[in-house]
Amino acid sequence: MSDIRYKLHPVSAFINFMKSLKELIIPFIVIFGVNIFRDGGISAMFSQGWIGLLPLLIGLVVILFSLVIGIIKWKRFVYWFEDGELRIEYGLFVKKKRYIPFERIQSLNYTEGIFHRPFNLVKVRVETAGSGKVGEAEAELTAINREDADRIEKEMENAKHRVVPSMGPHEAVEESVEETNVPKKELKTLYRMSMKELLILATTSGGIGVVISAVAVFLSQFSDLIPYETIYEEVMLFLRFGYLIVALAIFAGLLIAWIISVILTLLANYQFTIQVDDDHIYITRGLLEKKKISVPFKRIQGIKVSRNPLRELFGYAVVTVESAGGSMGGKDEKIRLFPLVKTARMLPILTELFPDMEFQPALTKAPKRSVHFYYRLDFLWMLPVIGLLSYFFFPYGLLSLLIVPPVILIGIWQHRTTGYALTGRQLTMEFRGFSKHTFFVWKKRVQAVNVLQTYFQRKRDLASIQATIKSGMLGYSARINYMEKDDATRILDWYHPSPISAKQKGQPE
């Protein structure tokens, strides 16, 4: 192993500086926002001497300090390879060291931001089985050359493929380890998202809610500076133009938010590509910020196929991989194997990726007598509301009764979707909230199977079944409700090494 110390590219100092500025945006806006709304505005700052310029001077000092910190972080960050480990030394005021055995590294995820591409650089996130918080990498190399990134991957592969040759009785121990020169793996491209699929994904992604919530959070940071009385007066004047103008204004605002969400989705998923080798699935996406993540096959716990009603109608689905560690970027974001794909195109690729899994099994459906359980609980809160509305707003409150048929129909819809299948060493569960979800998992990946029964379910010999797998910090659970009690026992017998039904009947195992 080489003990040469490698440094990050100088661009990492600027990237660290920009990260610090990003964290200071809100404080700066608050400081200068106060001066904008006070008497005289910003011009008053320059008419009061150095005291008026104090906020500006403090801001410049903070910016300069952030730049110095970014440079120091870059200068003190080094990494090298030694004894089968990736070793990192870093720290601002206190020097820290981190040793990561290559055997523990699950994946190397690459990101090319707008500051990386002009210099052919990448950011490398090192993911291990024991990474700390959800979505947090074991280590992050802010900016290195692509050749250096390839060197890390080569060192990792060499460490994982070291062999121990047979030794004679008089051979030296220090010669017992032999490194192999592992050839670079060939990647096979299985899928590349078409522009049509990308446009459909962007226009049906539902990102408008994310945009509106982001605006709300941003405005909440400045609630003390917003002149609510003035805004209220302006709104009241605006309402005098009539309901049509107000409706058009609301529509225009929602349209702008939708357009923004479409643009963000297009930028995030541009040229979405799936590649594969013997050990990993590689997912590449992004225009302004290009990301490449690797998902080891051995870390995949289950696969979930989701279809909202609109996409289901046109034969599209979203495929999510439940992985024990790893995420899309630095957040605890589920790894989408397919952000959007035609079902007919999806099935052959999934079959090639996971040849031991059945993706179209025959499902055992929920019994007919359980259908009313799917909408019974909704009436517990719905009937009092309907009664109050009908009493206080009679006769128009009676229109609230119109909500009853849709609730019943949705319950029937959920009942007809619910089902499961046991095929060899695989469990398939299908259920619906409003979107339809099909969950595929191997028996060896299931962490727990729980059978739940209420008093009313026991009277009808029904049970709800929940399967849990390792995914992130809290895991992921799939649940099918109001199935036959015998179905629950069958799933427990399948999962448990000793038949549950035999124990319950007092029979020998």
Image (tube, rainbow, N blue to C red):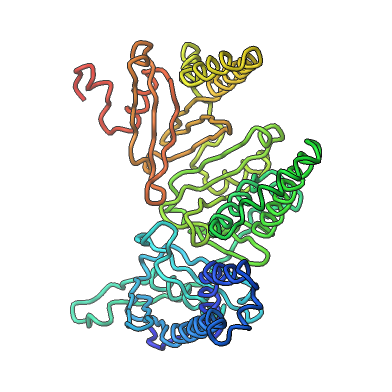
Q: Position of residue 177 (x, y in %)?
A: 31, 76
Residue closer to the observer: 244 or 421: 244
- The picture places residue 170, in percent across and down from the top left corner, at 19, 81
Q: Is residue 147 visible?
A: no
Confirm whether residue 162 shows in the render: yes
Establish if 239 lies above or below 45.
Answer: above
Give me the residue at 27% from left, 33% from top: 497
Q: Which quarter of the figure has residue 435? A: top right
Q: Is residue 230 left or right of residue 128?
A: right
Position of 148 relative to 265 (above/below):
below
Name the residue: 53% across, 14% down: 387
Question: Along the horizontal axis of the image, is 488 left or right of 347?
Answer: left
Q: Position of residue 216 (x, y in %)?
A: 58, 51
Quadrant occupied by the N terminus: bottom left
Relative to 106, is 361 on the left or the right? Answer: right
Q: Nearer the viewer, residue 423 or 501?
A: 501
Number of numbered discs overlaid on the protein picture: 0
Quadrant location of the C terminus in the rendered image? top left
Q: How far from the left and from the top, in percent, is residue 201?
A: 69, 47
Looking at this view, is 233 or 312 the one in front?
233
Name the residue located 62 percent from the left edge and 76 percent from the top edge.
Answer: 115
Relative height, residue 242 to residue 100 (above, below): above
